[in-house]
Amino acid sequence: MTTVYLALGSNVGDSRHYVEAAVKQLSKLLKDINKAPLYTSKAVGYTDQADFLNTAVSGQTDLEPLELLKAIKAIEQSIGRVPTFRWGPREIDIDIIFYGDLHMETELLTIPHSSCRERDFVLRPICDLNPSLIDPISSQSVSELLAHIDAQQESILKRVE
């Protein structure tokens, strides 16, 4: 079994419902699932859109990384994700951030997630779950990475639960 950390986000329709539905389905996919608090954050990349509701989950899996990705994409589709454009609005987005201490780069999947070190809306919820989790690329803990995000990169507006 491998411990994985997934980031979830939504900014279309009933975001809380979409996130909760994703967590419910992920709880059938992962063992010993834990969910971080919810946060609202400003959009990153394409900023002319609604704020996001973000969280993270951790859990154990026997699935290989690409199998996990396939299962996650099926969950997104079952919840109602409609493809738009890069960084566009989403009913639900689930990203694999960490998969144990694995480092991999393929056309389909990069682990750890390529931009996780610059995103407080990813690091903060993961830090809530495990502040001492080590990023295998930087060898820093998620709490150290979070502390190094400068004010220009901060996007979290507030904790909502």
Image: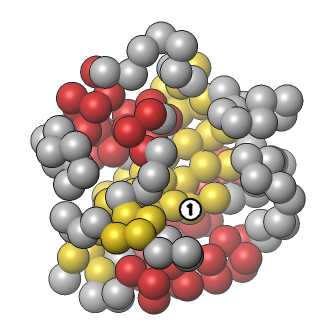
Q: Amino acid at mark 1?
A: Ile
The structure residue drawn at horizontal position 43% and vertical position 56%, both measured from the top left corner, is 113
Residue 132 position within the rendered picture, expressed as x and y whole percent measured from the top left:
13, 41
Could you tell me which quadrant the N terminus lies in? bottom left
Q: Is 49 or 106 nearer to us in this picture? A: 106
Residue 50 position within the rendered picture, expressed as x and y whole percent measured from the top left:
80, 33
Element type at mark 1: strand
Numbered marks: total: 1
Residue 104 position within the rendered picture, expressed as x and y whole percent measured from the top left:
34, 70
The structure residue drawn at horizontal position 64% and vertical position 82%, both measured from the top left corner, is 74
Question: How busy is the neighbourhood of tag 1: few (under 14 within 10 Å), some, or many (20 plus)?
Answer: many
Residue 107 found in image quarter: bottom right
Residue 2 visible in the shown view: yes
The structure residue drawn at horizontal position 47% and vertical position 11%, both measured from the top left corner, is 151
| Residue 50 as seen in the image, left or right of residue 74 | right
Q: Is residue 31 above or below residue 156?
A: below
The structure residue drawn at horizontal position 76% and vertical position 53%, both measured from the top left corner, is 86
Q: How was the colour assigned to the protein in this rendering?
A: secondary structure
Q: Is 150 or 7 nearer to us in this picture? A: 150
Residue 25 visible in the shown view: no
Residue 11 position within the rendered picture, expressed as x and y whole percent measured from the top left:
74, 44
Q: Is residue 95 above or below residue 107?
A: above
Q: Which residue is mark 1?
A: 94
- In this view, the residue farthest toward the top is 151
Q: Is residue 134 above or below residue 44?
A: below
| Residue 73 as seen in the image, left or right of residue 15 | left
Q: Is residue 74 above or below residue 156?
A: below
| Residue 67 as seen in the image, left or right of residue 4 | right
